Amino acid sequence: MSLPTKRINLAFQGGGAHGAFTWGVVDRLLEDGRLDIEALVGTSAGAMNAAVTAHGLVVGGRDGARAALERFWRAVSEAALFSPVKPSALDRWMSVGNLDYSPMFQWFDSLTRMLSPYQTNPGNFNPLRDILRAQVDFERIRADREHKVFVCATNVNTGRIKVFGREQMTSETVLASACLPFLYQAVEVDGEFFWDGGYMGNPPLYPLFYECATRDIVLVMINPIKIAEVPQTATEIFDRINEISFNSNLMREMRAIKFVSDLIDKGFTDGGRLKQMLIHTVDAEDQMRRLSTSSKLNASWEFLTWLRDLGRARAQSFLDEHFDKIGNRSSTDIDERFL
């Protein structure tokens, strides 16, 4: 006898290797069997998770998506074996994933601040391009009418957000969403050039308002909003600036959601055109705030699976505590969490 299901939309933040946390969350939600997915939206690593999940769903349902995510992250880890940027013995002793004491990371970080990828990587090599093309059938995603998928990028010339929908899904649009300008040359799509979508939306939620019937959004967060102490070292300050920058647009959207929700609660629906969105979040802020930005470049299998297992555990807690709220009310207090 099949379980009754509830329909949700999934929204994935970006954050390099920290995206393996999202892998774990999605793996557990799909394994549970009580949730159906209408749409996915993601930025950067979140865009990759969204594309890989959409591919898996169309070729093999929930089990296919779980298998596709594991293959993708294993391939990312295998590609990282050839990178000289690895945690040192001191890094392993001090943290589960940071690279702050890695001489090669320090050298690489300094290099990217002095030279652009047009100088350091003139051939524009990106190992993720080959991984995506080998593992994701973008033609099948574009042809799928059961699931919607959106990825976000930043137009370099206009500074505007660009959301690519299912019909535009290719390896290049996903790479555009994940193009950190200090690491990779801007990605060209249809004559325009793009950088990482996190600068404009991490992730953008508005496609889920306007193009989806489902009201429930499960947002998988990997960038901490709150921290316990004021940063004092240069690295800590840089990390916090990065977190604030990549959360800013999401917090603005949450303010808009709260504004509309308050209007609806007061009886104003604009003739039925306003829709009250139900917001749910899965995160590990207590753990993620202990990781520095350097750990986003740590694609060792040991670290990725630690993040995966953390994601699975937090997804299980979400299901245990909030499953009954899906379809009925938000499980996240927007005022407390974002405003």
Image (cartoon, grey):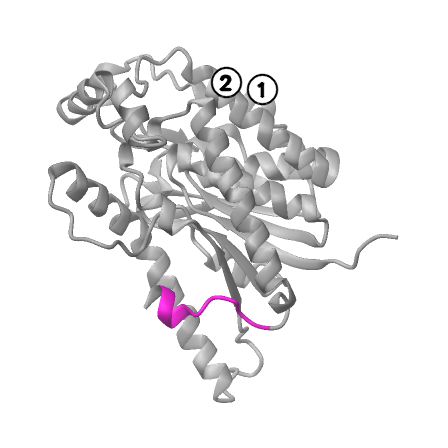
Q: CA distance from mark 2 to mark 1?
A: 6 Å
Disc 2 crowd, CA 10 A, few/some/many (<14, 14-19, 20+): few
Q: Name the residue: 33% across, 12% down.
A: 123
Is residue 66 covered in magenta? no
Disc 1 crowd, CA 10 A, few/some/many (<14, 14-19, 20+): few
Q: Quadrant of the C terminus?
A: bottom left
**Residue 37 in view (yes/no):** yes
Q: Nearer the viewer, residue 126 or 225?
A: 225
Counting from the top left corner in percent of width and height, residue 271 is at 56, 83
**The magenta segment:** 329-337
Counting from the top left corner in percent of width and height, residue 205 is at 46, 57
Q: Relative to residue 104, is residue 225 depicted above or below?
A: below
Q: Which residue is mark 2?
A: 130
Where residue 134 is drawn, which disc sits there? 1
Q: So how many labels did they put on this image?
A: 2
Residues at discs 2 and 1 in contact (Cβ within 8 Å): yes
Is residue 332 covered in magenta? yes
Please, what is the three-letter code of the amino acid marked with disc 2? Asp
**Residue 129 in view (yes/no):** no
Counting from the top left corner in percent of width and height, residue 304 is at 46, 30
Which SS class for mark 1? helix
